[in-house]
Image: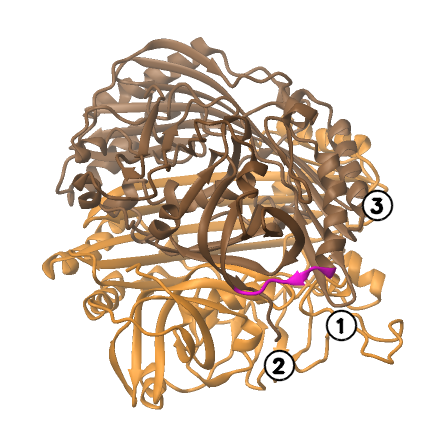
Amino acid sequence: MTILSEQTAKNLLSKVIAYSKADEIECNLNGAVGGNIRYARNTVSTAGEESDVTLAVQSSFGKRVGVATINEFDDASLEKVVRRSEELARLAPENDEFMPVLGKQEYLSTPTFVQATAQVTPEDRAQAAQNSIEPSKKDKLIASGFLEENTRFTAIMNSKGLFAYNTSTNVDFSVTVRTEDGKGSGWASQNFSDVKLLDTAKASQIAIQKAKSSVDAKEMEPGKYTVILEPAASVTLLQNMFNNMSQRQADEGRSFLSNKAKEGEDPEKVAKNKLGQKLFDERVHLYTDPQHPIAPYSPFGSDGSPINKIDWIKDGVVVNMPNSRYWAKKTGVPYVPADGNLLMAGGDESLEDMIKSTRRGVLVTRLWYIRSLDPQTLLYTGLTRDGTYYIENGKIKYPIKNFRFNESPIVMLNNIEALGKPVRIEGGMVPAMKIRDFTFSSLSDAV
Amino acid sequence: MQRRDFIKLGGLGVGGLMLPLSGRVISAEQILDKPMDVAYKKKLADIALNAAKAQGASYADARIGRYLNQFVTTNENRVDNIVNTESAGIGIRVIANGTWGFASTSNMTPDSVAKTAERAVAVAKANSKFQTTPVQLAPVKGVGEVSWQTPIVKNAMEVPVKDKVDLLLAVNAAAMENGANYVTSILFLVNEQKYFASTDGSYIDQDVHRLWAPFFATAVGEEGFKQRTGLGNPVGMGFEYLDGLEKDKIRIAGASVGYGNSYDILEDAKLAGQQLKAKLKAKSVEPGKYDLVLDPAHLMLTIHESVGHPLELDRVLGYEANFAGTSFATLDKWQSGKFQYGSDIVNIFADKTQEYSLGNVAYDDEGVKTKEWDLIKDGILVNYEATRDQVHMLGQTESHGCCYAQSWRDVQFQRMPNVSLKPNSKDISAEDVIKDVEKGIYIAGRGSFSIDQQRYNFQFGGQLFYEIKDGKIVDQIEDVAYQSNTQEFWNSCVQLAGKSDYRLGGSFFDGKGQPSQVSAVSHGCPTTRFNNINIINTARKV
C-alpha cells in the first residue's frame, strides 16, 4: 500500500480527522518506493530497493502542539496516533510563534508524475549500469556511477478543510570515468522526472570524452580568470544563495540581505532588508514555477500552502524574500513559502559559442566540497573537479590542474558575460554561465 | 553532500521530517519501551539466513535494528522542536553467484523476513550477470551469542525532556546575557539497538549510545555579524558528558577553554557571548606564513579530512570515485614502505575501541571483533581502513572491522573508524607548546573546511583565532583560514602536547556513499604545532 491513490488517501485521512478532539488537527501522509544501483571499477558494487509510508499527525490546543507518527493503518492504530499527538500537545510548552492551520486552498496542476519511472525493475537498472560500463571498458577506462529512481506521494488534510494530494517521480544518474593511470577524470549527470529520457550511454560518452581529454593537465597560476561554468559548476552556489535569502534572517541583521542605515539616516526609518534593491547583473532572473515542463515541482508545501510561480530575483533586483507565516504576520508582509524548484533563466548561447568568444579563460565541469567562509558576503570555497580546461583565442587549448576557488555568488552574478540555455539539474534549471574575474586561490594536485 | 547541514533542522514542521537519521516519530515515553526479546530476534534472523541459503546464497547476514533518536531544538527563549523517532526493521545481505545483494523491510513477520531474504538473493543474481570479480570475504569465526553496551553512566533517553529543554534555554540565555543576539542550541541523542547474525554462526546484540549538544551563537554589530559555535564534542557517552567537571577543562591563558571527557556547556555559552563581542572588534589577520598551534577540538577535523578519509580503502581502490572521490594515498605509496606521510613524530592509529568515542563498539556491522591498528608509524604510511571483502586486496587475512550501516534499512559498507594522533610520550602541556612559538596563531574549534577529492589541497578555518607573539597569546584575531597540502602539512608537524592534553573530538554526521549514509566517528589528539603554514584572509568586500 505504499503509493495510495488520491481517493484512498482522502478516505484514510478523513477517518483520522474524525478521531480528533483537539482544537486543530493536521495530517501528513507520505509514501515512497524506489530502487538504486551503484557500480565502480567497471562492475556493480551495491544495489537495493526501499519502500516506506508514514502518517504524521499534529494536534494543537491553543498554542500547544504535539506531533506523533505511525506506519500502521488499521482503525485502532489510527485512533492511537491521534490520541498520542493530543497527549503530547497537552504536555508541550506554549509556542509563541504558533500559527493556526490553513483553510482550504486551490492548487495548480503540475506534471510531476510519470508512469514509466514508477515501473523500473532491478533488471532495467542493471542494464542501464551496463550501458555505462561497457563503452568505458572498451576504451580501457574505469567507470563508477550511481542510478536511483523513486516514486512518491504526499497527502495533507486538516480540520479546516484543507486537502492536498500529489504524486511525483524522479530519476538521478551520475557517472565518473577515469583513465587506468589515474591521470584523467570526467563526469556527467542526468536528472529527470521521466525515466524514458534517461540515456546512461549518452551521459557516459561525455564522461569518457572528458576523462580522455583531461590527461596530463598543466599547471596554471591561481588568480582571477574569465570562467565558463557548466550548470553543475554553479548549481550549488545558486542554491546556497537562495537558502540564505530568508526575510527573517535579513531583518535580524544576520544575512547578506540585511540592510544597514547609512551615515545620517535614521535606523528606525530604514528598511531592515534589501528587498527591491538591485544587487545583480540585470540578466539575473531566479524564480520558482511548479508547472515548469522539464523541472516540475509539487504545487504545495509541507503545511499545505500553495506553491505558485514566483520571482525571487528579476532584472537583477531582489523582488521576493521567503519568510514563515509567523514572520510575515509580524512584519505585515505577504507570506512567501521558502519552498519550490530553483529556476534560473538563461540566454541562447551554446557552450561552444561561449568558448568561441573567449580570448583567455577556464572551462569548469563542476565544483566540489563547497563550504561557507563568510555568511555576510556569501564567500564560499571549494575546488574544480573532473574536467578543467584552459581556453585561448576561442579554443580549448589543454587540460589544467584543478583550482581551489574563493568566491561569492553575489560577485559571480554581477560579473556575467553570457548565459547559456538552462538545463535540468538537481530538480531545478540552470544555464551555463560565462563569468569574468572569478577568483582561484590555489592549485590542487587532485585528478 | 559531505556532511549534513544540521542547523537546517531548526523549525521543521510535520511535513519536514528530513532528519539526518530516518525513522518515524514517537512519543518520549515510547523511546523507553523495552527492546525486542533477544530470543525472538535470533528466531527471525535464522529465518532470514535459512531462506537466503535455500535460495542459493553462499553467505548471508541479517541485521535487526531498532534505532532511536531524540532531537531537541531551541532558539533564543523558545523551543522549536522536540522530535522522537523510532525506526525498526531488518536488513539482509547475501552473496549469491559471487555477488552482493541486499534487501530490507520494516515488516518483521516471519513470512515477510523470508521474502525479503529471497529478494536480496534475487538482486544478487540479477547483478551477477555483469559481475566479473567474485566477492572474497576474509574469514571470521562465529562467536555464538554475545552482547555489548556503550559504557554509559546516565542514559540520556531517560533524562526528562523538561530537563533538556531547561538546559538548552539556559545555554541560550547565558550566551545572550554575555553578548550574543541569537542562539540556536540542539541536543541530538542516538541509541542504536542492533542485533547481527550471520551464516558464520554469530549472534551479536549491541546497545550503542551517542550524544551531541552543539550551539550556534550570533552577534550583530554595526559593521556586520559574527558567529561562534560551541566547543563541545559529540561523544559515545550518556548524559554524564554534560556534567562539566572541572578536572576535564583545559584552560589556555588569554584564549579559550578546552573540554575533555565532560563538557561545561553553560560556561562555554557564556564565553561564546564574550568572545563574540571581541570578534566584532577583532583585527583582521595579515596573510602570510605562520606557525600554527591547533587545539584538539579543531585538529580533530583536520585529522578526519586529511588522514581518516584518504586512508579509507574503498576510496583508494576507486569504489567512491563517483561521489566522495579517490585518494592520493595510493597502494604503491603504501607498498614502498617509505611514504613519508608526516614528520617522524606523527603516529596515527585507528580503532573502534576507545572509551567515550563515537566509533566504540565490540563488533562492527559484519560481525568482526573491533581492534586497534597503526595507520601511520613514525611518519610512514603503514596501513588502511578496510572491511572483510577488501583486506585480501592488501594481502591481509583479517578484516579491520570498519563495516557500518546507518540503519537496518541501508546496506553496510566501509566507514571510517576512530582515527587518532598519539600524544607526546613526554607529558608537556598545551601552554608548553605555545611558549616556543615566535610568530604564530592558535586556533580553537572547527570552522569552514574544504578538501579536494583526492585529499591533497585543503583549506580550514576555525572558531577562535589568537595571535601568538614570542611565546604568548596577545590578541584575538579574525578572518583566518589556512591552506596546505596534506603531506606537506603533516611533515611540518614539530611538537605535540602529552597525554594529559589528549582529547577526543568527533563528527556526528559524516556522509559517504550513494545513497548517502551518515556515520559518527571520533578523533583523539593533543594540542599540536605545525610550522610555516600559509594563512589567508577570508574577509571580502562585495
Secondary structure under tag 2 reads strand
Q: In this orientation, which residue lies closer to the viewer: A20 or B103? A: B103
Q: Colour of chain B?
A: brown
Q: Tell me which segment is drawn in magenta.
A: B281-287
Residue A315 seen in render: yes
Q: Residue drawn 77% across and 44% down? A: B175
Q: CA distance from mark 1 to mark 2?
A: 19 Å
Was residue B31 drawn as part of the magenta stretch in this picture? no
Secondary structure under tag 3 reads helix
User: Dot 3 surroundings within 10 Å: few (below 14), some, or many (20 or more)?
Assistant: some
Chain that bears disc 2: A
Q: Are marks 1 and 2 on the same chain?
A: yes
* Coordinates of residue A209 in the picture (x, y in percent): 21, 69
Q: Residue drawn 77% across and 68% down? A: A334
The answer to whether the residues at label 1 and label 2 have Cβ atoms under 8 Å apart is no
The answer to whether the residues at label 2 and label 3 have Cβ atoms under 8 Å apart is no
Q: Colour of chain A?
A: orange
Q: CA distance from mark 2 to mark 3?
A: 41 Å
Chain that bears disc 3: B
* Coordinates of residue B428 in the picture (x, y in percent): 52, 31
The residue tagged 1 is A259
The tag on residue A314 is 2
